[in-house]
Amino acid sequence: MLQTPSGGAGRGAAATDRLMSIGTVLNVLRDEFPEVTISKIRFLEAEGLIEPQRTPSGYRKFSAHDVERLGHVLRMQRDHYLPLKVIREHLEAMERGEAVQLPALGRQRDGDTVPESPETPTAARIGRDELLAAAGVGAEELREWESYGLVTPLEDGVYDAEAVTVASLIAALGRFGIEPRHLRVMKAAADREAGLVDQVVAPLKRHRNPQTRAHAEARTKELAGLTVKLHAALVQTALGVRLP
């Protein structure tokens, strides 16, 4: 049996024995994981990390165990930068009652990072075919989005897992007639916001104290969450609407 995750996911799951809709699950998880989206939850389901029940009409219904498991998956991605395959194997081993340890990404000694075995994965990555399948788009669409810089592969040709969310949102906007060329202004704004955050945390990253440098990552995540919330609030204010 998995341990009850700390934070919002654990409290929300323990508070109810009834099945939850994907929207309710999203609200429960966002206490601890403000960046999580419905697309991300669907992607994790497609990857076999969770198996929610389905109503006769096809709607997903999540149990408390599903939410608990989602919390574990998101936490291992956030805190340990593990790929989904490793996370899946880890959770399956835990549910079989095996004593397992998370792979170490590296350790610090005298302020220097000592890399672990090269086989140790360092971040959540997905291949091109996985991205196309998860986002439900075609190769030609993805090439167009890449030409506008909306989705960018990494050096080894794979993608950060968050590219699934980006691709899904681009596709959703496209159904309203918003074309990729229209989204360049959003990409430019996101780059400027990221640059501002980098400017704030840069002194922490350059600090001689390793603990201070490690704190830079937490500060980056905190600032990223605040900028995303501010951006959403400004857009809602400009449009005169309030999203649920």
Image (spheres, rainbow, N blue to C red):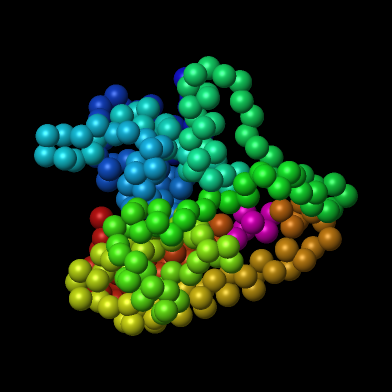
Residue 215: x and y in percent read 69, 54
Number of numbered markers:
0
- Taking the image as shown, residue 157 lies to the left or right of residue 62, namely right
- Taking the image as shown, residue 93 lies to the left or right of residue 50, namely right
Magenta segment includes 217 = yes
The magenta stretch spans which residues?
215-220
197 up-or-down from 112: above or below: below
* Residue at 65 percent of width and 37 percent of height: 103
**1 or 25, which is in the foreground?**
1
Identify the image quadrant of residue 47: top left
Q: Which residue appears farthest toward the top when viewing the image?
A: 97
Q: Is residue 12 visible?
A: no
Q: Which residue appears farthest toward the left when viewing the image?
A: 57
* Residue at 77 percent of width and 66 percent of height: 206
- Taking the image as shown, residue 24 lies to the left or right of residue 114, namely left
* Residue at 42 percent of width and 74 percent of height: 146
